[in-house]
Image (cartoon, grey):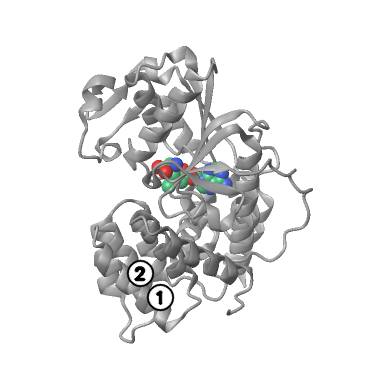
Amino acid sequence: MSRARIEELLASTIGLDPGSIGTQAIDLAVRARMRTRRISDLVAYCDLVEGDVDERKELLEGIVVSETWFFRDPQAFRFVVDHVASRLRSGTSLVRILSLPCATGEEPYSVVIALLEAGVLPEQVEVRGIDLSPRAVELARAGAFGANSFRGEDLSFRERWFSTAGSNWRIDPRVQACVSFEVANALGPTLDIGAGTCDVILCRNLLIYLNLESRRKLLGRIERALGESGVLIAGHSEDIAALAPRFRRSGNLAAFAYRRSEPPSAEPPAVASPPCESLTPRRRPSRARARARRAGSAGEASVTQKNAGAMLPPAPSADSYCLLGVTLRCTGKLAEAAACFERALYLDRDHYDSLVHFALLCEHRGEREAAGRLRRRAARVSRGGIRP
Ligand SMILES: C[S@@+](CC[C@H](N)C(=O)[O-])C[C@H]1O[C@@H](n2cnc3c(N)ncnc32)[C@H](O)[C@@H]1O
């Protein structure tokens, strides 16, 4: 009952799908706050957190996952450089880029580094980073980064744009000067990102944590904030086209870039939230899947694989085959991954996650027709699951 109150609070404030991080992670964060506030009764803590904005912020700090690093998914940054170059060539004098969420700043700073290295002038770009977490934004503004922020194979950019500061690296002030940071809730009533103002919006690794209603709401906001030729860059496991059919894939598939295919519709007036729906409407992700999904989002394929191996239930299920498929895809074993998704769909032909991941895999292999079929099936399932 009390856990339901906490989950309801998280859903109504930040749109969290509890299954995406696992109830254990939520329990841990709640227990840590109860210890800090010296409260032993969960009901008393629920009363406090529901009525106290500052306590709510503290709890959210313990819930959100601010995992990020420089040039995470490098293809995305190559795509942004090409897009910005084409906007500047077509006569735009100032290109506006939004990183939402920006976490501790590695993403917006990577964009600036990539652009400056491509010859774009600082006065030609304006990069804005927004995140819910005041602590993350404070670190982003400070501009000093530890080893965990540098994970790619090619770290040569660090020599060019950072100076050492003890065990940290401090970002070049010229890069810092191109980015402004704000604390804001992407789903809150006061978020102001301006209609039609953005040339690029990076919204990566947030949608995976949201319930379906909040994903759609955020995508609606992004759609309205994008200029006519603006692009949305999503995370690699975030299937935008299945969620918001008005977005279509653009450019290199590995960049996960999307454009609007129609003018945006107006934001619906705020109404009382209907019950939160999960992306996988018929089943809640198990803790094992949630853990593996988080590890995957953190780019830790080996951890994901270990989790998958350790957590497969004794009886094969669509969930377990899907999880194994995702793991194999992360490690580049595409044929084996495809076999797992096929197996999952054999066991449950409406297994939404398998349909989406298999579609992404087919797209990656250039099998557009198969990908289209899978996407249509996934869309049908998410609308109510009518079997053809
Ligand atoms: C995994 S990080 C993603 C950072 C970066 N985009 C990337 O892909 O590396 C997720 C971030 O989302 C932020 N976040 C979660 N809910 C949010 C919300 N409702 N509004 C704004 N930011 C949010 C968290 O604070 C966290 O820093």
> Is the CB of the residue bearing disc 2 within 8 angstroms of ligand 1?
no
- Give the quarter of the image for residue 334: bottom left
> Residue 170 is drawn in which quadrant?
top left
Beta carbon of the mark 1 residue lies under 8 A of ligand 1: no
Q: Is residue 321 above or below residue 298?
A: below
Query: Which residue is at 72% across, 44% downward?
Result: 265
Would you say 382 lies left or right of 347 here?
right
Q: Is residue 254 left or right of residue 46?
A: left
- Residue 205 x %, y %: 45, 48
The residue that appears at 41% across and 70% down in the rendered structure is 287
Of all residues, the one furthest to the front in this rendering is 369
Name the residue tied to disc 1.
319
- Residue 43 numbered mark, or none: none
* Circle number at residue 323: 2
Compared to residue 48, the image places residue 291 above or below, namely: below
Residue 62 percent location from the top left of the image:
47, 51
- Contact (Cβ within 8 Å) of mark 2 with mark 1: yes
> Which residue lies at the image location 32% right of the left edge and 20% below the top edge?
117
Other residues around mark 1 within 10 Å, as few (<14) / some (14–19) / many (≥20): many
Q: Looking at the figure, which quarter contains the N terminus?
A: bottom right
Query: Could you tell me how far apart the alpha carbons at marks 2 and 1 are, in whole angstroms?
Result: 6 Å
> 178 or 368, which is in the foreground?
368
Q: Is residue 40 visible?
A: no
At label 2, the amino acid type is Leu
Type of amino acid at the residue the image marks with label 1: Asp
Horizontal and vertical percent for residue 167?
Answer: 22, 30
What quarter of the picture does the C terminus occupy? bottom right
Q: How many marks?
A: 2
Secondary structure beneath disc 2?
helix
Q: Percent x, y for residue 47?
A: 66, 59
